[in-house]
Image: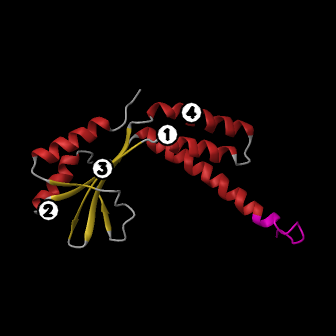
């Protein structure tokens, strides 16, 4: 079983402590209104390069955020899945995969480092592969929910109006 990003989280904490960074444990900054500049962690996965960039800019304050997979996330996805109308085969596939992903509950699913410089937020993000899959499943279920809601709106007039 591939673990989460727990080892990476520990390495980041150790590196920041040894590098005399000021670590601010924050919430995710992805949704902040300031302009974001995302680090290409796919091609340059080493967080040290990102942290060193802040050091070279003489920015010592680095925000650190991490997220563990909460059982409620999967519970909510299963609840949402129960409320949508989809083919039984598709339902079983999604339900089975969600239940399989429970083995990752309590593991670190996401790590995020960021710093601000001249009005922009520079951000490094890594997500566990299984977390990416879980987000894709949740998005797929949300798409079904949205389609069901749109269908409810159309039918709410009792079928008196054309669906053209």
Residue at mark 2 to residue at mark 1: CA–CA distance: 36 Å
Please state which of the two labelled residues, at mark 1 or mark 3, is closer to the viewer: 1
Q: Which residue is mark 4?
A: 99
The answer to whether 145 is drawn above or below residue 157 in the figure is above
* Residue at the (62%, 39%) spot, across then down: 94
Mark 3 closeness class: few <14, some 14–19, many ≥20 residues within 10 Å: some
The answer to which quarter of the image holds residue 155 is: bottom right
Image point (66%, 54%), residue name: 145
Is 91 drawn above or below residue 141 in the view shown? above
Q: Could you give the CA–CA distance between mark 3 and mark 4, rounded to whole angstroms?
A: 29 Å
The quadrant in which the N terminus is found is top left
Percent x, y of residue 76: 57, 46
Q: First in sequence: mark 4 or mark 2?
A: 2
* Label 1 environment density (alpha carbons within 10 Å; few <14, some 14–19, many ≥20): few
Q: What residue sits right under mark 1 in the picture?
A: 71
Disc 3 + disc 2, Cβ < 8 Å? no
Give the mark nearer the N terminus: 2 vs 1.
2
Q: Is residue 148 magenta?
A: no
Residue 158 relative to residue 144: left or right: right
Chain-order first, disc 1 or disc 3? 3
Q: CA distance from mark 1 to mark 4?
A: 11 Å
Residue visible at 50% across and 47% down? Answer: 135
The label nearer to you, 3 versus 2, is 2
The spot of residue 34 in percent (x, y) is: 33, 71
Q: Are marks 4 and 2 in contact (CB under 8 Å)?
A: no
Identify the mark at residue 59; answer none if there is no mark: 2
Q: In what element is the residue under mark 2?
A: loop
Q: Position of residue 12 (x, y in %)?
A: 22, 44
**Residue at disc 4, secondary structure:** helix
Residue 41 has which mark?
A: 3
């Amino acid at each position: 079983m591939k673990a989460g990003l727990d080892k990476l989280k520990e390495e980041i904490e150790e590196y920041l402590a040894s590098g005399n960074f000021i670590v601010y444990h924050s919430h995710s900054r992805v949704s902040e209104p300031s302009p974001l500049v995302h680090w290409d962690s796919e091609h340059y996965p080493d967080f040290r390069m990102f942290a060193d960039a802040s050091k070279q800019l003489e920015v010592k304050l680095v925000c650190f955020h991490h997220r563990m997979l909460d059982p409620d996330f999967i519970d909510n996805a299963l609840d949402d899945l129960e409320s949508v109308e989809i083919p039984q085969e598709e339902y079983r596939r999604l339900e089975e995969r969600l239940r399989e992903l429970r083995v990752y509950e309590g593991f670190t699913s996401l790590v995020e480092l960021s710093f601000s410089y001249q009005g922009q937020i520079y951000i490094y993000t890594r997500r566990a592969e299984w977390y990416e899959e879980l987000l894709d499943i949740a998005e797929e279920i949300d798409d079904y929910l949205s389609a069901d809601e749109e269908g409810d709106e159309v039918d709410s007039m009792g079928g008196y109006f054309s669906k053209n």
